[in-house]
Image (cartoon, rainbow, N blue to C red):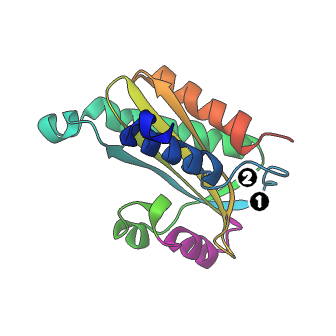
């Protein structure tokens, strides 16, 4: 029977089984209590354009503005939940390409600021229709991920970004078990 399936199909099934059990793509599931309010270094969002549009047309002003708007929405939500947001020193952050994948630099900087958490996020543009929004909350002392989540949105609009990040905050990062 295995021979009848065909080798490519068998490989595909094996990969699906391995990935389904590994938690691939999840930095850490939302388990336990959500992070209690405390001080946090807020690093903002890193934009990754994996579509060909950015390479061809360059940086779009509307996307830059949209990232800034989403950062403000996230910061406001965190403050409304009781978090005290601290701004990391620009000179320390400038040399780091992506703080969400920085080998603990975000936690180190947050710890040096005296913050309890390091919070950062990513926006990955797959196409102008499909975008992936990520947010990470890490313990500054240990560097461990306290909560992390991702949502995919359809549409590169202010409203889709706002709704996507508010959903991520409410239903993943601060979800009560």
| Residue 79 location (% of width, % of height) | 70, 45
The residue beneath circle 2 is 83
Q: Quadrant of residue 27?
A: bottom right
Most common SS among magenta residues: helix
> How many marks overall?
2
Up the image or down, 124 lies above or below 141; here it is above
Residue at screen point 68% across, 45% down: 78
Q: Residues within 10 Å of mark 1 (few under 14, many from 20)?
A: some
- Dot 1 falls on a residue whose secondary structure is loop
| Residue 61 location (% of width, % of height) | 27, 33
49 left or right of 86 in image: left
Magenta highlight on residue 52: no
| Residue 53 location (% of width, % of height) | 20, 33
Up the image or down, 100 lies above or below 111; here it is above
Q: Nearer the viewer, residue 16 or 114?
A: 16
Q: Quadrant of residue 124?
A: top left
Q: Which label's residue is closer to the chain start, 1 or 2?
A: 1
Q: Which residues are magenta?
A: 103-117
Residue at screen point 56% across, 48% down: 19
Disc 1 + disc 2, Cβ < 8 Å:
yes
Label 1, label 2: how many angstroms apart (C-alpha)? 5 Å
Up the image or down, 41 lies above or below 173; here it is below
For the C terminus, the image quarter is top right
The residue beneath circle 1 is 38
Q: Quadrant of residue 62?
A: top left
């Amino acid at each position: 029977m295995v021979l009848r399936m065909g080798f490519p199909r068998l490989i595909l099934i094996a990969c699906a089984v391995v990935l389904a059990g590994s938690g691939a793509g999840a930095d850490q599931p939302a388990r336990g209590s959500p992070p209690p309010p405390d001080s946090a270094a807020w690093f903002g969002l890193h934009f990754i354009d994996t579509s060909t549009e950015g390479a061809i047309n360059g940086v779009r002003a509307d996307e830059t503005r949209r990232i800034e708007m989403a950062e403000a929405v996230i910061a406001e939500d965190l403050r409304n939940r009781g978090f005290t947001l601290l701004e990391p020193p620009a000179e320390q952050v400038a040399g780091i390409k992506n703080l969400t994948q920085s080998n603990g630099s975000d936690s180190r900087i947050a710890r040096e600021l005296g913050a309890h958490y390091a919070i950062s996020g990513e926006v990955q543009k797959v196409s102008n229709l499909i975008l992936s929004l990520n947010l990470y909350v890490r313990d500054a002392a240990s560097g461990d991920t306290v909560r992390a989540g991702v949502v995919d949105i359809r549409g590169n609009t202010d409203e889709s970004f706002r709704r996507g990040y508010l959903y991520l905050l409410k239903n993943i990062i601060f979800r009560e078990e």
